[in-house]
Amino acid sequence: MEINVLEESKNRLVVEIKGEGHTLCNALKSELWKNKKVKVAGYNISHPLVGVPKLVIEVESGDPKKILADAVKSVKKDADEFLKSFSKAVK
């Protein structure tokens, strides 16, 4: 996975996430929408076979990088909990 910052301002962040697709982007988008400071959270993949996802975040207040980092931590925590529960269930 490679992340490139395409646009960065006080209230907006656009990043390109090479090597990922809908799975990660949907999880991040959903987690970002849980934050009340987020005004816009979405992503676009220009071509379904060769497109690179572009994630867009706009916030009313706060640092969009920190808000994205917090969303990533939350998604990781959920994935870790799922793995733990799944491992228990299949033993």
Image (spheres, rainbow, N blue to C red):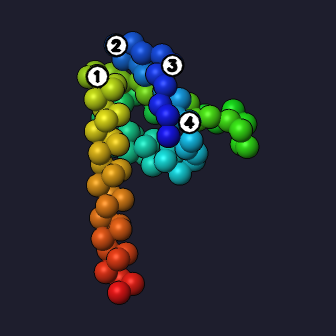
The residue at the point 34 percent across, 25 percent down is 64
Which of the two marks, 3 or 2, is nearer to us in this view?
A: 3
In the picture of the structure, the residue carrying the numbered disc 4 is 18
Residue 37 visible to an observer of this rendering = no
Q: Residue at x 48, y 16 (%)?
A: 7
In whole angstroms, how far apart are the C-alphas of marks 3 and 4?
12 Å
Residue wearing tag 3: 6
Q: Earlier in the sequence, mark 3 or mark 4?
A: 3
**If the image is split into quadrants, where does the C terminus sit?**
bottom left
Q: Residue 61's spot in the image, x, y percent? A: 28, 21
User: Mark 1 or mark 3, which is nearer the start of the sequence?
Assistant: 3
Element carrying mark 3: strand
**Mark 4 neighbour class, 10 Å CA radius: few under 14, some 14 to 19, many 20 or more:** some
Residue tagged 1: 63
Q: Which secondary structure lies at badge 1? A: loop
Amino acid marked by disc 3: Leu
Q: Nearer the viewer, mark 3 or mark 4?
A: 4
Looking at numbered disc 1 in the image, what kind of residue is underneath it? Asp
